[in-house]
Amino acid sequence: MLETLVIVKALGGKPQKRIFLSVEDRQALVADPALLEEILLGIHKPIEVPSENVFHYDEPIFETLCQEWHAAKQTNETHWKRLAPLEFLSDPAE
């Protein structure tokens, strides 16, 4: 399986590092990297998020967003706009 790291903009703007699994009906299926093996074994399930909240992973921007979140429980929209939205042209498992 091809593992594509992404940044998900969760509730309230909280940044989350996730693995993109697939997309269906504008909903991206993502998984916590720490739970990937358990998801593959059926112990846990991935979550669906709106595809517009999924971005290409960029470590420096992710770290900045995490610092903002930890300091004030909010993030600066300007930093989110610097991230490239993930394009959903094909399933990453193909």
Image (cartoon, rainbow, N blue to C red):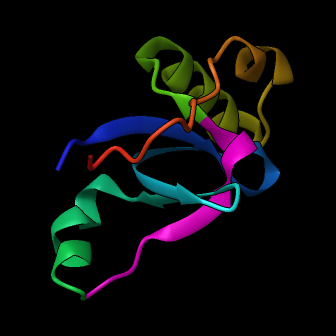
Q: Residue furthest bottom?
A: 43
Locate residue 86 relative to residue 1 in the image: left or right: right
Residue at 21% x, 42% y: name it. Answer: 2
Question: Relative to the observer, which residue lies in front, 60 or 93?
Answer: 93
Nearer to the camera, 63 or 89: 89
In this picture, residue 27 sits left or right of residue 72: left
Residue at 16% from the left image edge and 50% from the top image edge: 1
Query: Residue 85: image x %, image y %?
Result: 64, 26
Q: Is residue 15 left or right of residue 82?
A: left
Q: Position of residue 90 (x, y in %)?
A: 45, 41
| Residue at 24% in and 63% down | 36
Q: Is residue 10 above or below residue 54?
A: below
The segment highlighted magenta reads 43-54
Residue 13, image quadrant: top right
> Where is residue 92, by image quadrant?
top left
The image shows residue 12 at horizontal and vertical percentages of 81, 51
Q: Is residue 49 above or below residue 83?
A: below
Q: Position of residue 22 (x, y in %)?
A: 45, 55
Q: How many marks?
A: 0
Seen in the picture, residue 83 relative to 94 is either above or below; the reply is above
* 11 left or right of 92 in image: right
* Residue 73 covered by magenta stretch: no
